[in-house]
Amino acid sequence: ENTLEGKTALVTGAANGIGRASAEALAARGARVIATDINGPAVEAVARDTPGMSGHPLDVLDGEAVEALVASVAPVHILVNCAGWVHDGTILDCDDDIWDRSFDLNARAIFRITRAVLPGMREAGTGSVINIASIVSSEKSAPRRFAYAASKAAIIGMTKSIAADFVKEGIRCNAICPGTVQSPSLNERLAATGDFDKALAAFKERQPMGRLGQPEEIAEMVCYLAGDMSAFTTGQALAIDGGWSS
Ligand code: NAD
C-alpha cells in the first residue's frame, strides 16, 4: 500500500491545477502537506478544506522566503515543484526578459528550493523530489513554446543530475511530463487566443485520446513517485500525455 503516513510533503504552486490536485492527493494518502503558492489566500482556502494540509503564501522566486519556509517546516520528505509559467511564442517573440522569467520560474526556483530541502532529506536518509516538467521540453516540441520548452528541458537535466548525485543516500528525483491538462491557466491561455472554443478544439485535436488530461491524473503519479512503491524509480522523465508523444 502506498501510504504516506509520517511523511511531510512540500508543494509549490498548490492553489490551482496540478499543484492543488497533488497537494490534495498527498494529504488523502496521509502525508502532512505544506501547500504553498504566490496566491496566499487561495492556497489557505484550499488548505482549510483539506485535513492534514496547511497553506502558506510563498513566491518561489523569493530565495530568502524559500529558505525561511523550508527551515520552518523541515524535515521535508517529499518535494513537489509545480509552480511554472508558459510563454506563448517563438524564438522571435522571446526577448531577454521573457527568457529570464521563464528560466527564473521554471528552472532557477526549482534549483533553489531543492537545494534548500536536500540537507534535511540527507539527514533523514530518505526523500523524493518530484518536478513537474512538461512533455513540451526535450521530449517533444509544440508550436510557440520556445522559452517554455527550453526551461522545461532544463528541469529534466536537473532531475537526472540530482538523481545521480544522491541515489546512494535514499533520495530520488523524478520529473513528470504532462501533456495538455485542464487548469485555470490553460483556460486563460485558451481565452487569450481570442477564440476559446476553437483553441480548445485544436488542443484536443493534437491529443490522440481526443481529450485533455485532468489534474487528478497527474496527482496519481505524484503520489506514486512520493511513496515507497516507486522506490526503484529515479532520474526519470515520466510522460502522462494521452499518447501525444507516442
Ligand atoms: P496553473 O498554471 O493553473 O497554476 C499554477 C499555480 O502556480 C497558480 O496557483 C499560481 O498562483 C502559482 N504560481 C505562479 N507563479 C508562482 C510563484 N512565483 N511562486 C509560487 N507560486 C506561483 O496550474 P497548471 O496548469 O496545473 O500548471 C502547473 C505546472 O504544470 C506548471 O509548472 C506547468 O508548466 C506544468 N504543466 C502544465 C500543463 C497544462 O497543460 N496545464 C502541461 C504540462 C506541464
Image (cartoon, helix red, strand yellow):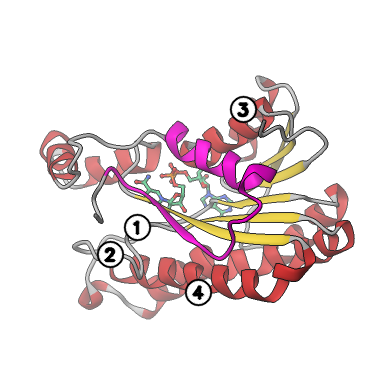
| 225 vs 148: above or below | above
Query: What residue type is disc 3 on?
Result: Val
Q: Are marks 1 and 3 in contact (CB under 8 Å)?
A: no
Give the residue at mark 3: 46
Q: Which residues are magenta?
A: 215-242
Give the residue at mark 2: 140
Q: Are marks 2 and 1 in contact (CB under 8 Å)?
A: yes
The tag earlier along the polypeptide, 3 or 4, is 3
Separation of marks 4 and 1 at Cα, in angstroms: 14 Å
> Residue 173: x, y in percent?
62, 61
**Residue 172: in magenta span:** no
| Rendered residue at 65%/25% (across/down) | 28
Separation of marks 3 and 4 at Cα, in angstroms: 32 Å
Separation of marks 2 and 1 at Cα, in angstroms: 6 Å
Q: Are marks 4 and 1 in contact (CB under 8 Å)?
A: no
The tag earlier along the polypeptide, 3 or 2, is 3
> Residue 124: x, y in percent?
87, 56
Quadrant the C terminus occupies: bottom left
Separation of marks 4 and 2 at Cα, in angstroms: 15 Å
Give the residue at mark 4: 157
The tag earlier along the polypeptide, 4 or 1, is 1
Give the residue at mark 1: 135
Secondary structure of the residue carrying tag 3 is: helix
| 19 vs 47: above or below | below
> Residue 92: x, y in percent?
21, 77
Q: Is residue 52 shown left or right of residue 44?
A: right
